[in-house]
Image (cartoon, grey):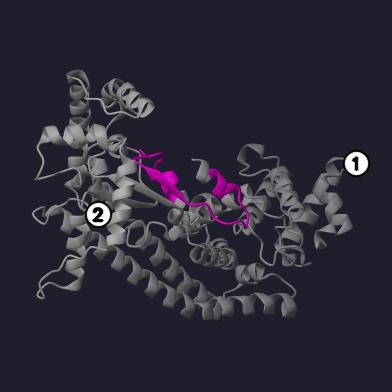
Amino acid sequence: MATLWVLEKRLRQSSPFCITFGCPFVGDVGLQEAVGRENWSGNFCHVVSQHDVVPRMLLAPVESIVAPLIAILPFWESIMANDSKHVPDSFIQDACRTLLHNVLQYTHTVANYGPDSLRELDVVIKRSPYRPFGTYMFCSSEGTTCIDNSETILKMLHLTMQSHEKTYDNIVHDCLAEHIGYGSVLKHVIEKSICGEIITKSDSESSYKMGMSLQLEAIGVGVQNDDAPIALEIARGIENKHDTNVAKLAIELSEKQCHMAEIEWYKERCEKEDGITYYDSFRKHNDIDANLGRVKLAEFWDEIIEMWERHELPSDFQSQNKWINAGTAYRRLVEPLDIAYYYRMSKDNGNYLSDGRPNRYKVLEKWMEAKEKTRSSRGERPRTRPASLTQDSCFWAHVEEAWKALENAKQDQVHQRLESPEMFESYVTRMIDHRNISSDVFLEGSSFMKWWKEWEKYRQNQITGWSCPLYKIMESESWKG
């Protein structure tokens, strides 16, 4: 946890590297995703001995491990305090046997599911909320191997506990001894690395299968265990599929930039030649090229969201800067056109915000917001110049609803208001204060400026000498930056 705190607080300083020995899980899926989102997985290495039960115990329900763990902890403490070897009495052995049984019973259920179908297990039983993150170094007397696929780690935590060479009682003994014996484990690993032992295989075996066999033998999982190589093979296949999908999407993303450029050109043309925003222009009449780009880009991002929801992309895909930045740029440039299209075609006085917003924009916005939380916690500098694109991609939908609210206010239909003009007024003021509104919003012919003039007139007719923060901003034109 201290390493996570340092990683979060550091700015451009060197990255800390955390190595744990026999550490239990410390976080849930949220922490796992946050570590992946910030590309911190490479900063953590968790060393796990073959029969140490502690790294695995939180896979079982907490209520099933509390009693035996309370009995075992004093035994471990006495050994570490005296640096001596004590033989556990029958009470301690029974407690360890109970702890091991409860943990293995649960991890066995997890191990029976392939890495790609572990999520289906949530329907069958209540899975532990704890999840691994970082790289796991599994150790045995034969050597070590490293795994960074989280679902494969869960499966291997069970499989490495199994042994065809040791009795159950011996494994129970190792559960007690190995958690406090990582000093000798580390020494053994270093010696094996220095010696550079080589295990030869027959020529008929592929280099990949040879490597996989060596990995499994190194962590004490014999070739007679069919589940372990299958787990690694499935994990490898999933990762290869994910990498292939991302590579294809990256190519498509570069190809779709022509549509982004077309819409940017359309935006600039509307402002310079027509003196109105591209939103208002598209709201009034269709532009064939801009609409084609809008549709093509929607198809592309819908495909990405669908693939992500089907788990066909890496688990940290939504946290990668490339896709967050690309999705945010798309959302802020193109969603105003979708809003314009919605209100141009709407015949039933619909509300885009509650009824018409496509799921792709909601998902992309969530990805960005998750990233922004980390950036803000690191003390990102505030914006000093107005944004080139309005940061809230739903801004024009708020304008549309503000028009409805104003008309309702004029007719004194308070009960029908969806968003009060006062709320919208405060919203715009905050946006301007944070320089999150682009300058095209204030073009003389924009629907926002028309709304403001109507709202100002309405309020001044109601209250003599009426004023508000937004009124002062608009009068002084301080929105110009």
Disc 2 crowd rating (10 Å Cα; few below 14, some 14-19, many 20+) is many
What percent of the width, then of the height, locates residue 42?
44, 56
What percent of the width, then of the height, locates residue 84?
31, 28
What percent of the width, then of the height, locates residue 185?
30, 45
Secondary structure of the residue carrying tag 1 is loop
Identify whether 132 is placed above or below 76: below
- Distance CA(mark 1)–CA(mark 2): 84 Å
Q: Which residues are magenta?
A: 5-33
Question: What residue is at 11 percent from the left and 52 percent from the top?
Answer: 225
Q: Relative to residue 274, is residue 66 drawn left or right?
A: left
The C terminus, quarter of image: bottom right
Tell me the number on the disc at residue 464: 1
Q: Determine which residue is flagged by label 2.
A: 143
Nearer-the-camera pick, 213 or 335: 213
Question: What residue is at 11 percent from the left and 55 percent from the top?
Answer: 226
Nearer-the-camera pick, 412 or 254: 254
Q: Relative to residue 130, is residue 402 drawn left or right?
A: right
Between disc 1 and disc 2, the foreground one is 2
